[in-house]
Image: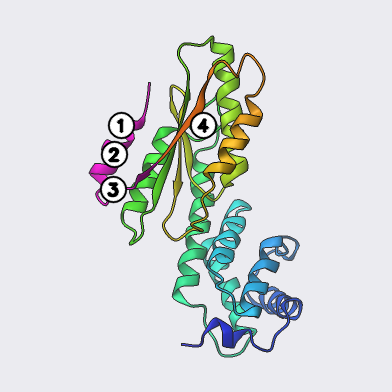
Amino acid sequence: MTTPARLGSATLPADLAARWRARSLASIWLRASDWDHPTVDHMAYAVAIGDDPRDSAWNLGQARGEIGVGIEETIDDVACLYHALGPHHPPPTVLRALCAGWADAQAGAVVAGSCRDPESGLPTTQYLAVRIGEACASLTPGHLVVVDVAAGDVLPAVRIARSAAVGEALVSTYGAGHPMAALGGGVFAVLVRGEQDPVDLVPLLRREIDRRVGDEPLRSATRCPVRIRSVDVPRSPTDAADLISRLART
């Protein structure tokens, strides 16, 4: 198999992106107006310099899925990128990441509206349970970052404001690429897949939460310090469902 380093050894990212675009629009892409996207440039850059393109492929797949591009068109488009370099095909690892990102966008569309927690704006427990079940089948299922901000009984209006603040902090810290949910009663969880960047974002998350709940009455309604722990995703779907049941607070 040709390595990414060899693929990108003599190609400038901007030149590769231009050749990729021309090849895709001339052959398989249906709407020229929606091809350009920042994730395209990141993907071309990763391939051109010989970097691992899996994260870029995941983000590209998610971006394509969010605007309604079909999975076949998405895959064929990335094939055009590699064909622009010669007789090459996308590596299976890149295609898997691309499809995973596309599937994440589709799942996000499914949880819109009534499938979102009205207080935090995050997906519901049922959504996260499905994504954890999918992670169980992976060789590297990853872990859950569990956040508990509850500090006794609070007024409904304060609870809603606290949930919204924590939801914003989670999205700001982890981004849309990480499935997350409100589990009820001031408990939240984020799924960090095993193949994703292992950088510990918990310190940043603490700062983001503290910044958003620093004023009264949210300060008094929020556990201090916020309890954050990591829980390994079980290998069994049954165990995963049990885990969610234990974590959920209703």
Q: Is residue 185 above or below residue 143?
A: above
- Asked if the residue under mark 3 is in contact with the one under mark 2, i.e. CB atoms within 8 Å, the reply is no
Residue occupying image coordinates x 71% and y 61%: 38
- Amino acid at circle 1: Ser
Q: Which residue is mark 2?
A: 241
Q: Which residue is mark 3?
A: 234
Which is in the foreground here, disc 3 or disc 4? 3
Q: Which residue is mark 1?
A: 245
Q: Quadrant of residue 172?
A: top right
SS of the residue under disc 2: helix
> Between 5 and 212, which is closer to the camera in this rendering?
212
- Amino acid at circle 4: Arg
The Cα–Cα distance between marks 1 and 2, rounded to whole angstroms, is 6 Å
**Between disc 4 and disc 1, whose residue precedes?**
4
Please count the marks in the image: 4
241 relative to 116 in the view: left or right: left
Q: Which mark is residue 165?
A: none
The Cα–Cα distance between marks 4 and 1, rounded to whole angstroms, is 18 Å
Q: Is residue 170 visible?
A: no
SS of the residue under disc 3: loop
Residue occupying image coordinates x 56% and y 90%: 87
- Asked if the residue under mark 2 is in contact with the one under mark 1, i.e. CB atoms within 8 Å, the reply is yes
Residue projecting furthest to the front: 225
Q: Is residue 249 magenta?
A: yes
Residue occupying image coordinates x 70% and y 85%: 11
Q: Which residue is mark 4?
A: 116
Residue occupying image coordinates x 48% and y 47%: 107
